[in-house]
Amino acid sequence: MIQTDFIKGVIVPILTPIDEDERIDEAKLRDQVDYVIEGGVLGVLAFGSNGEFYVIEEDEMERGLKIMVDQAAGRVPVYFGIGGISTKKCCRLAKMAVANGASGISILQPMFLKPTETELFLHFKTIAECVPETPVLIYNNPGRVGYTLSGNLVEKLAHEVENIVGMKDTSGDITQTSEFIRRNRDIDFKVFGGKDTLLYASMCHGAVGGVCTAANFMPELITDVYNKFVAGDLKGSLEAQFKLNPVRLSMDGASFPVAAKDMANLRGRAVGKPYTPNLPTPEGPVLDKIKKEMMIAGLI
């Protein structure tokens, strides 16, 4: 029986601080792990979208994961994000992650392709079965890969593959998120909202938490939404959501995923630059808007 009680709360797709040679900066990464845990997150996701997984070599991923697991030291689970296209590569990464202490893995649907549901089912099932004792979350991100996972496919995976125990839905479509929850509630399938601005709404429909970029630079605000909700203070939770949303929405003017590092740096986190070809947001209207909303929220 796969244990899933720990799969809940705000999980942060942690930033990957790098040095001038685009190598992971160990000291800054350890500091970021401490910062988000002290900020109240209940999980760290290594190499999610905001961790810039798509530009990081496998050996660097392994080094980074070891650092994160060591620094977390059992305080919260560390999940490992897999975004490869090749099923074979994804299996290799899953085994590597489990061997290095990951408590769970998250698998993004393959980007660039236009796979059939049969192909997708076999992709997720094959990877999950490579690590049969480990909880697996599937990650629906239609905005980045160009297609969505269907309710039928998710229901089939949830009910037929024992260790596929949950998912993150970044569709931004609350009806779709709700359907993923409704159709799999008989097996306690753990659904996370993937849009920071919809954490409260997702939880109202039964989500167990959110995978939230905002926790990288304002963990106290996003965890406040979650903590008040589970304490039964729905009005307070909604107000916390409303306080967070203008800051989060100000990121949308910047190129993805640059704004998260920009905002962390504005808060004094010193996480460094994004991997090239991305560049820090230049001075101008976009950065001015970000600074303004952070100031209104009392973050800077």
Image (tube, rainbow, N blue to C red):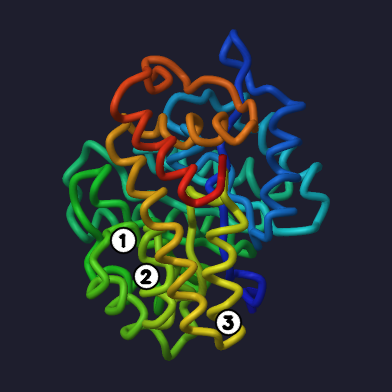
Whether residue 192 sits left or right of residue 233 in the image: it is left
x and y, in percent, of residue 12 in the image: 56, 51
Distance, label 1 to label 3, CA atoms, is 33 Å
Whether residue 151 sits left or right of residue 128 in the image: it is left
Residue at figure coordinates x 27%, y 79% from the top left: 179
Secondary structure under the numbered disc 3 in the rendered image? helix
- Which mark sits nearer the N-terminus, 1 or 3? 1
Q: Give the residue at mark 2.
A: 157
Disc number at residue 121? 1
Q: Give the residue at mark 3.
A: 230
Secondary structure under the numbered disc 1 in the rendered image? helix
- Residue 119 occupies which quadrant of the picture? bottom left
Residue at figure coordinates x 36%, y 52% from the top left: 246
Whether residue 31 sits left or right of residue 175 in the image: it is right
Tag in front: 2 or 3: 3
- Residue 266 occupies which quadrant of the picture? top right
x and y, in percent, of residue 14 in the image: 57, 43
Do labels 1 and 2 touch, CB within 8 Å? yes
